[in-house]
């Protein structure tokens, strides 16, 4: 059995080891290639301050690239008896390079290693979320423009209220994604700062060049204060989780609308048959299971910030093993949210719209406000016009005019989709992902 990085002569009790390691070996597979990237940057810095020779660095970088490619192909494994990804990488280097592999840990702790791995992993996941969110945004905005003149009922209190349109409906969710990515951008700024060099939370007596590793890894800046760098464990995850929860809330609401609008009682939209599932007993059923599962998954993700808060609550400064548990709820959540984004984008591209909804007389009262406004424009005071139309409705004498003319910004006749598109592009550009991507490509020699 491989020795732990921290183990001396006394062997830890097996039950204690199993409990303390928990799901770390499984969770650390998410972090493998990012641990290697961090080791590449750290090794390069160690050579610059004389703790590695040029020859040793050359050998280390060559071996680290092999491990990186293993992780890229999904072939990296943490061996039985090896505690975590950090131990596995160091073990592989030591097997290949002997004592040179043992030198790589100088000037760092597993504490700042995992901090770094989490930040590198998270910023890569945010890049994928931003790309997928923008993909969905483009579909929604396209559908908004395509169906801008097709009316549907608007609701308040789930009661028929005023005319809306598919242009407004699709466009509303598109603009919601802009705000979601604005919050994600703020979370990305918190994430994209370098904690490496904080070691166990109190720095190092080695003359580390933290700016060098910051530049090599493409970070915006570093977490300067080493105590704060460690205090950021959990805080970064919680901040990103809040941004993920915002995005999940938009998807959940869209999923609810879609399920409701697709039902026979509404009949506003129709999902293609191949996008629905059937019943084991009712042969007519076409169930919107994708949107129901999306709603549930996204509602679960909205609980993620609270889970992380409860794990980290009331911890003093410094490291605690409690923080390990965050990985179990945080790391897998990205895949779940990305899957939901992909499926909703796919579905929204193919949804069919009912273009004759308002021909049904049950929606006649939708146009009552239009009649009130027409009277006001002819000189009748608003309160008098409101009462006149209300009395006509009560007496059953109201005959709606179905002509709609809304011209102000963001209304049925003036969606402002061009402005919303510019807003989204500005947010996407502010992430400046190419800076990070270029740094990582250069580090691994691509």
Image: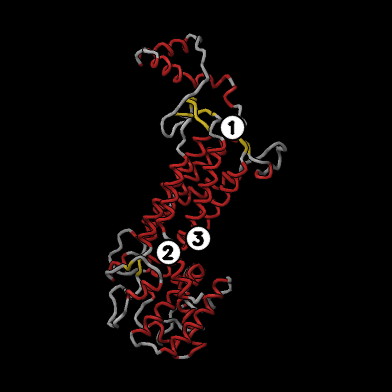
Vertical position of residue 9 compared to residue 209: above or below: below
Any part of residue 228 in sight: yes
Vertical position of residue 297 compared to residue 215: above or below: above
Q: Please name whichever residue, 320 or 49, is drawn nearer the observer in this view of the structure.
A: 49
The colour scheme used to paint the residues is secondary structure
Judged from the image, the secondary structure of the residue bearing numbered disc 2 is helix
Vertical position of residue 139 compared to residue 122: above or below: above
Query: Residue at point 52% right, 47% down?
Result: 138
Judged from the image, the secondary structure of the residue bearing numbered disc 1 is loop
Any part of residue 111 in sight: no
Crowd class of label 1 (few under 14; some 14 to 19; many from 20; radius 10 Å): many
Q: Are marks 3 and 1 in contact (CB under 8 Å)?
A: no
Vertical position of residue 414 compared to residue 108: above or below: above
- Distance (Cα) linking label 3 and label 1: 35 Å
**Which of the 4 image quarters holds residue 196?**
bottom left
Q: Please name whichever residue, 200 or 140, is drawn nearer the observer in this view of the structure.
A: 140
Residue topped by disc 1: 268
Q: How many numbered marks, from 0 up?
A: 3
Q: Are marks 2 and 3 in contact (CB under 8 Å)?
A: no
Residue 325: give its label: 2
- Distance (Cα) linking label 2 and label 1: 44 Å
Q: Nearer the viewer, mark 2 or mark 3?
A: 3
Query: Residue at point 54% right, 78% down?
Result: 79
The mark nearer the N terminus, 2 or 1, is 1
Residue 332: give its label: 3
Q: Nearer the viewer, mark 2 or mark 1?
A: 1
Query: Residue at point 41% right, 83% down?
Result: 104
Q: Please name whichever residue, 438 or 243, is drawn nearer the observer in this view of the structure.
A: 438
The mark nearer the N terminus, 3 or 1, is 1
Residue 360 percent across, percent down from the top left: 59, 22
Residue 339 percent across, percent down from the top left: 55, 54
Residue 249 percent across, percent down from the top left: 46, 46
């Amino acid at each position: 059995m491989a020795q732990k990085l921290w183990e001396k002569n006394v062997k830890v009790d097996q039950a204690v080891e199993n409990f303390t390691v928990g799901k770390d070996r499984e969770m650390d597979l998410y972090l493998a290639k990012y641990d290697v990237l961090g080791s590449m940057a750290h090794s390069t810095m160690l050579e610059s301050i004389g703790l590695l020779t040029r020859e040793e660095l050359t050998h280390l970088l060559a071996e680290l690239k092999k491990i990186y490619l293993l992780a890229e192909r999904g072939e990296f494994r943490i061996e039985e008896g090896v505690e975590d990804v950090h131990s596995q990488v160091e073990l592989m280097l030591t097997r290949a390079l002997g004592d040179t592999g043992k030198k790589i840990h100088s000037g760092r702790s597993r504490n700042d290693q995992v901090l770094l791995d989490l930040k590198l992993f998270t910023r890569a996941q945010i890049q994928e979320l931003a790309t997928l969110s923008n993909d969905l945004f483009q579909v929604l905005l396209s559908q908004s423009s395509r169906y801008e003149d097709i009316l549907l009922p608007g609701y308040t209190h789930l009661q028929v209220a005023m005319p809306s349109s598919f242009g407004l409906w699709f466009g509303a969710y598109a603009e919601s994604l802009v705000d979601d990515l604005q919050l994600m951008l703020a979370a990305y700024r918190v994430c994209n700062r370098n904690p490496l060099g904080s070691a166990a939370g109190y720095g190092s007596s080695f003359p580390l060049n933290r700016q060098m590793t910051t530049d090599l890894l493409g970070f915006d800046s570093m977490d300067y204060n080493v105590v704060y760098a460690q205090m950021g464990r959990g805080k970064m995850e919680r901040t990103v989780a809040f941004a993920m929860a915002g995005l999940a809330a938009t998807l959940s609401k869209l999923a609810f609308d879609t399920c409701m609008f697709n039902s026979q009682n509404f009949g506003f939209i129709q999902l293609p048959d191949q996008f629905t599932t059937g019943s084991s007993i009712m042969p007519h059923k076409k169930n919107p299971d994708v949107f129901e599962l999306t709603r549930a998954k996204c509602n679960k993700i909205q609980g993620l910030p609270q889970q992380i808060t409860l794990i980290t609550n009331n911890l003093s400064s410094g490291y605690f093993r409690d923080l390990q548990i965050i990985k179990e709820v945080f790391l897998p959540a990205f895949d779940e949210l990305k899957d939901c984004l992909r499926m909703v984008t796919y579905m929204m591209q193919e949804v069919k719209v009912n273009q004759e909804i308002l021909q049904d007389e049950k929606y006649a009262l939708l146009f009552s406000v239009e009649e009130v406004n027409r009277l006001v424009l002819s000189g009748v005071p608003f309160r008098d016009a409101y009462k006149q139309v209300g009395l006509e409705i009560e007496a059953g004498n109201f005959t709606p005019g179905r002509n709609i003319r809304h011209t102000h910004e963001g209304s049925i006749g003036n969606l402002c989709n061009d402005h919303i598109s510019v807003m989204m592009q500005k947010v996407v550009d502010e992430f400046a992902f190419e800076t990070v991507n270029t740094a990582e490509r250069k580090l691994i020699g691509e």
